[in-house]
Image (cartoon, helix red, strand yellow):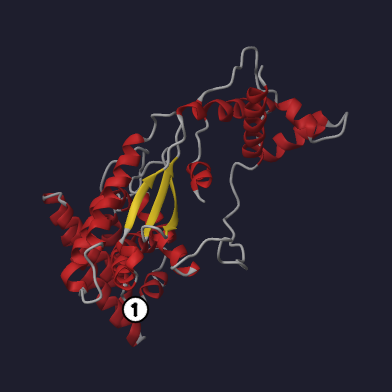
C-alpha cells in the first residue's frame, strides 16, 4: 500500500470513528472575531455585511430538499474587476455526483444577479422588488413547497400540509377569542383569522395552476401572516386540547421559514442599492479534480474498530473502553463495527472541504 493511500485511509478512519462517537453534532457556536480582515486583503464590504450576505445566499443555495447534496458557500472580493465572487460547492460521493444541483444553483444565482445588476440608487423597490422575489422563489420553489408540505420530497414524510395546520389553528383561535380579555390579543386573533384565510385561498390558487407567480403570492401571504403583532403569543395560549404543542410549534416554524424568502428578496434589493459590489456578483462553482475521488488501494483491508480504540486507550483496557462506548451509544459491538465500515465506504466529500482550498 502506497504512502498516500495510507494517509487517505488513516484520515478516513479518524473521521469515521469521530462520527461514530459523536454522530449527533453539537449546535454550532460563534467564535469571537478579533481581526476582521485577512492580511493583505482589502475588503470594501464590512465583515458584518459580508457575513450577512453570505448567509443569505447560502440560505437560497439550499434550494431543494436534498440531504445528499447540501451546499456550502463563501464570498471573495475581486479588487481587479470590482466584482464579488460567490464560490459554492455541494457534497459529492463521486466526481460526477451532484452536477444537476450545481447547475441549478448556478442558474438560479445568475438569474438573480442579472436583476440585481440593474439596480441603482434611484431604483424603487416597487419597480424591481417583485422581479427579485420571483427569481428567488423560482430558484427555491422545490424547497418552499417542501416546507409547506405541498409537494413530494425525496424523504418519506407523514407531516401534514400547512393548509391543514392552518385550518386547525383557525378553529382553535375561533374558540379562544370568545374569552379573550386582552384587547391586543383580540386584534391579533382578528388579523390572524383574516390573513390565514387569505393564505388558504392563495395555496388553493397555486394548486389549481402551479406556476411560480402564484407561489410568489403564497410567500407574500405567509409573510403578511408572519408580520402580525403578537402572533406567537396568540398561538401559545391555544389549549393543548384544541391544538397540540407540536402542531403549534410547526405552524410558527413554517411561517417563519417561508416568510424568510420574502425577506431575502427585500435584503438583496437593499444591499444592491447601497453597494456596487452587490450589483456585480458572479458565480464560481468549486469542483475537486477527478483524482481527488480516486479510492486508495484497499486489497485485504477491512476497518478494525478495536485497533482504533486501542490507539486511544492504555494497554489492557481496550475491550472495557469499547464496551463502555457501545453502552453509551446503546448498540452492540457488531453494530458499532458495521457503522464504522458503512461510514468509511459511503461517506461523501463535504462541500466546505472543497471551498477552503479555493479561498485565497
- Furthest residue in direction top, as rendered: 300
- Furthest residue in direction front, as rendered: 80
The structure residue drawn at horizontal position 34% and vertical position 50%, both measured from the top left corner, is 283
Residue at the spot of label 1: 229
Residue 268 position, x and y percent, is: 31, 65
Asked whether residue 252 appears in the rendered view, the answer is yes
The structure residue drawn at horizontal position 55% and vertical position 25%, both measured from the top left corner, is 345
The structure residue drawn at horizontal position 43% and vertical position 29%, both measured from the top left corner, is 95
Q: Is residue 306 above or below residue 209?
A: above
Q: Quadrant of residue 180?
A: bottom left
Residue 239 position, x and y percent, is: 41, 68
Viewer-nearest residue: 205 or 214: 214
The structure residue drawn at horizontal position 81% and vertical position 32%, both measured from the top left corner, is 320
Residue 213 position, x and y percent, is: 15, 57
Q: Residues within 10 Å of mark 1 (few under 14, many from 20)?
A: some
Asked whether residue 197 appears in the rendered view, the answer is no
Viewer-nearest residue: 242 or 281: 281
Amino acid at each position: 500500500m502506497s504512502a498516500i493511500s495510507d494517509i487517505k485511509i488513516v484520515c478516513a478512519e479518524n473521521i469515521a470513528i469521530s462520527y461514530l462517537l459523536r454522530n449527533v453534532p453539537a449546535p454550532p457556536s460563534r467564535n469571537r472575531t478579533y481581526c476582521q480582515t485577512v492580511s493583505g486583503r482589502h475588503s470594501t464590504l464590512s465583515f458584518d455585511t459580508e457575513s450577512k450576505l453570505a448567509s443569505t445566499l447560502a440560505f437560497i443555495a439550499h434550494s431543494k430538499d436534498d440531504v445528499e447534496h447540501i451546499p456550502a458557500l463563501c464570498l471573495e472580493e475581486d479588487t481587479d474587476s470590482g466584482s464579488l465572487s460567490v464560490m459554492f460547492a455541494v457534497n459529492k460521493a463521486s466526481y460526477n455526483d451532484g452536477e444537476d444541483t450545481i447547475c441549478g444553483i448556478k442558474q438560479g444565482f445568475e438569474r438573480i444577479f442579472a436583476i440585481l445588476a440593474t439596480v441603482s440608487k434611484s431604483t424603487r423597490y416597487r419597480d424591481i422588488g417583485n422581479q427579485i422575489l420571483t427569481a428567488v422563489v423560482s430558484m427555491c420553489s422545490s424547497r418552499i413547497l417542501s416546507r409547506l408540505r405541498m409537494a413530494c420530497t425525496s424523504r418519506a414524510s407523514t407531516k401534514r400540509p400547512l393548509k391543514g395546520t392552518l385550518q386547525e389553528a383557525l378553529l382553535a383561535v375561533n374558540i379562544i377569542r370568545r374569552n379573550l380579555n386582552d384587547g391586543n390579543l383580540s386584534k391579533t386573533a382578528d388579523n390572524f383569522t383574516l390573513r390565514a384565510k387569505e393564505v388558504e385561498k392563495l395555496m388553493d390558487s397555486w394548486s389549481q395552476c402551479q406556476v411560480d407567480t402564484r407561489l410568489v403570492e403564497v410567500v407574500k401571504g405567509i409573510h403578511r401572516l408572519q408580520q402580525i403583532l403578537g402572533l406567537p403569543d396568540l398561538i401559545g395560549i391555544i389549549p393543548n386540547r384544541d391544538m397540540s404543542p407540536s402542531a403549534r410549534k410547526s405552524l410558527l416554524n413554517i411561517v417563519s421559514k417561508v416568510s424568510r424568502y420574502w425577506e431575502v428578496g427585500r435584503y438583496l434589493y437593499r444591499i444592491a442599492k447601497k453597494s456596487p459590489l452587490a450589483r456585480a456578483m458572479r458565480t464560481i462553482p468549486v469542483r475537486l479534480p477527478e483524482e481527488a475521488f480516486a479510492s486508495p488501494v484497499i486489497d485485504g483491508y477491512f476497518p478494525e474498530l478495536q485497533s482504533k480504540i486501542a490507539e486511544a486507550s492504555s494497554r489492557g483496557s481496550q475491550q472495557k473502553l469499547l464496551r463502555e462506548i457501545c453502552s453509551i451509544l446503546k448498540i452492540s459491538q457488531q453494530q458499532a463495527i458495521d457503522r464504522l465500515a458503512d461510514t468509511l465506504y459511503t461517506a461523501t466529500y463535504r462541500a466546505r472541504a472543497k471551498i477552503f482550498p479555493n479561498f485565497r
